[in-house]
Image (tube, rainbow, N blue to C red):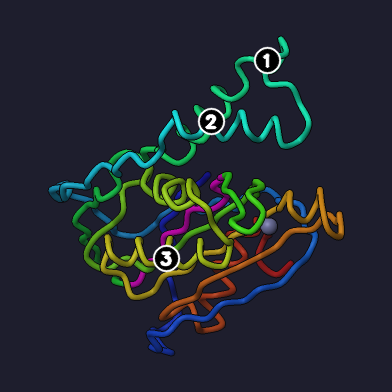
Amino acid sequence: MIEQLIPLDQARRHEASDHNMLSTSFNEPGGDKVVRTNGSGTRMATERASSQAARPALKVSVKRLERIGRNLLLAIGEDPNREGLKMTPNRFARWWKEFIDYDPGTIETTFAFESFRTDQMVVCAGVSVFSLCEHHLLPFKCEISMAYIATEHVLGLSKFARIAQKYSHRLQVQERLVHQIADEITAITDARDVAVLARGEHLCMQMRGIKSDGLMSTSVMRGLFRSTDAREEFLTLALGKKNGK
Ligand SMILES: [Zn+2]
């Protein structure tokens, strides 16, 4: 994961506030991430008082899940009392609790942003998360890249990953995941220009159905990222390709 501050040379245009979602499938190995230096006059100052990010309420009943785990074993013709399975309902229950009652920690830490340049693209590429497909309850693994054009507030560097994890630790579809991450970045930073790209490998596609490998890509492009230049700059960084290739 690499965070970057990148001067954005293009003039602000295409101010549309709506977003755009692309859904395509392709096979493309994750390449090396492009690193650029920040040569701008950026200064990050006083940490903004982080709002009281409420801890998520615990949702999972371990006792109920243990019963379900035991019933699941019975339903597939297993003996829940045999040696290897004795603790399985409990492990099953604790795994669900760990996944759903995940606490991403404090997310809403931002820094006041002072800069001689107002349009700087901040990109965090290649955050790896696991989520669960809500149609099949099977895992999917996503590599998520996020970007915004900084205005008044800059997101703390670890917060991108926390946001990505927060929305991954629930029953999900990849299309919704990118929107929820974009919404949260907007809510915290007040940025109008936000982009999120997720590339996921879905076990429900690989283990069942057509049993095909493939990366599913979903993206959200808002504000300036709807323009070709900003979008291409973001995708170049997110996909780890060098410019012009
Ligand atoms: Zn699925």
The residue depicted at 51 percent of the width and 34 percent of the height is 65
Mark 3 highlights which residue? Answer: 182
Residue 108: which disc? none
Mark 1 highlights which residue? Answer: 81
Is the CB–ligand 1 distance for label 2 below 8 Å?
no
Secondary structure, mark 1, is loop
- Residue 141, position as x, y percentages in the image: 64, 47
Image quadrant in which you'd find residue 147: bottom left
Badge 2, how many Cα within 10 Å: few under 14, some, many 20+? few
Q: Are marks 2 and 1 in contact (CB under 8 Å)?
A: no
Q: Amino acid at mark 1?
A: Asn
Q: Which residues are magenta?
A: 119-129
Q: Nearer the viewer, residue 198 or 230?
A: 198
Nearest-to-viewer mark from 3 and 1 = 1
The residue depicted at 78 percent of the width and 65 percent of the height is 26
Q: In the picture shown, does residue 243 fall above or below 130?
A: below
Q: Amino acid at mark 2?
A: Arg
Mark 2 highlights which residue? Answer: 67
- Is 128 colored magenta in this rendering? yes
Secondary structure, mark 2, is helix
Q: In the picture shown, does residue 50 fall above or below 58?
A: below
- Residue 43, position as x, y percentages in the image: 24, 53
